[in-house]
Amino acid sequence: MTQIVRRAVVTILFLLILAPGLLVANSSESEEPLVDVMGKVVMHDYVEVLNIKIYLPRILLVDGSWYFYGSTNSAVDSGEFQVVDGALVRADGSPVSLDMSITSHLVFVWIGILLVLLITFMASSKYRRGDGSETEPKGIAQNLFEVFFVFIRDQIAKEFIPSNKYEKFVPYLFSVFMVISFMNLFGLFPWGISPTANITSTAILAFITFFVTQFNGTRDHWRHVFAFPGVHPAMWLILTPVEILGLFTKPFALAIRLFANMLSGKILIICILGLIFIFTDIFGLAIGASSSIVWVALTSLLYILKGFIALLQAYIFTLLSAVFIGMAVEEHHHEDHETLVASATEVEV
């Protein structure tokens, strides 16, 4: 009896942790894989809440004409589109030129941005009333806001960006850190999705950092890209292409690092929980249910680790963004260096 109760508790915990429909329990009656790993991490045209699918609008451009539908089913029911290999194609066979549809990942990106805006406006209203500026911060929310903001300002922006310019970039760095943190943490909740497990999301974030960095780059920054001070012009043919390539490898590394870490963590959790069904399929229900104690316990530890990694990856992305911005806005005093070299030469002579 005790064993039956234990198995029931484990099963309930498993169902609470994992979204229903994540894994396929029996593969012998279907061609679907036993553990549908990629089905959980890829984008969908719906958001699933409490096992209820909320379908999202489809916005399509085909041959210069825009089409708007409330969902994929609406597009198919209209008779103008059909689903081919999981993608919408116009009924006459014309491919979609541009797909601007709302996706599950995009919804969670918007939620992350809205949460950061909400928290920032609430904190701003308190500071205007004097809470935190004339008195001590009040409430857990404002204290946490101040801890994160001061940390980003003093430990990241001030450390890696020149002292006369860092304040300009604090709002951007703080916003990036908070938005990425929320998007990373969303994947820890049942039916939640981590938009940063999508390369498109991380690429857009990296592109914004790239734009901010290059837009604020000083004349000295661009001199080090196209005309190196103190270097023979013949060497520019080698160094300039390398420096131009370096401008793009930095945001590329930002995007890949964040994407790979968040995607791998999600896949690892799904695979470990999937061992319950794999053991059940191979050894039977008794072994599968018994082994679930180990897999759920291991997954719980991974959840704690993944929560730490979610904040760590947001920190690393923000830190590297500050480093790249600091390198671009820094002023190098080549005149002083050249004067020192000339003085040393005169002394030797």
Image: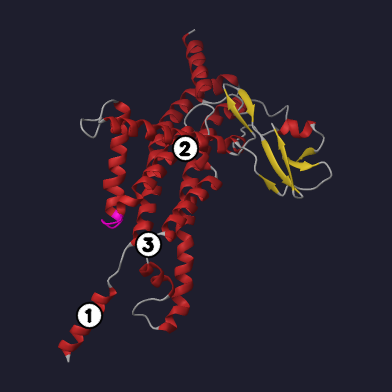
Which residue is labeled 2 in the image? 113
Relative to the observer, which residue lies in front, 47 or 288? 47
**What's the magenta region?**
160-165
Residue at position x 47%, y 37% in the image: 113
Q: Is residue 163 magenta?
A: yes
Quadrant of the image occupied by residue 338: bottom left
- Residue 5 in sight from this viewpoint: yes
Q: Which mark is residue 328?
A: 3
Q: Which residue is mark 1?
A: 339
Image coords of residue 2 (percent x, y): 46, 9
Q: Is residue 85 visible?
A: no
Dot 3: element:
helix
Q: Amino acid at mark 1?
A: Thr
Figure check: 223 above or below 68:
below
Residue type at mark 2 is: Ile
Q: Earlier in the sequence, mark 3 or mark 2?
A: 2
On screen, residue 203 above or below 272: below
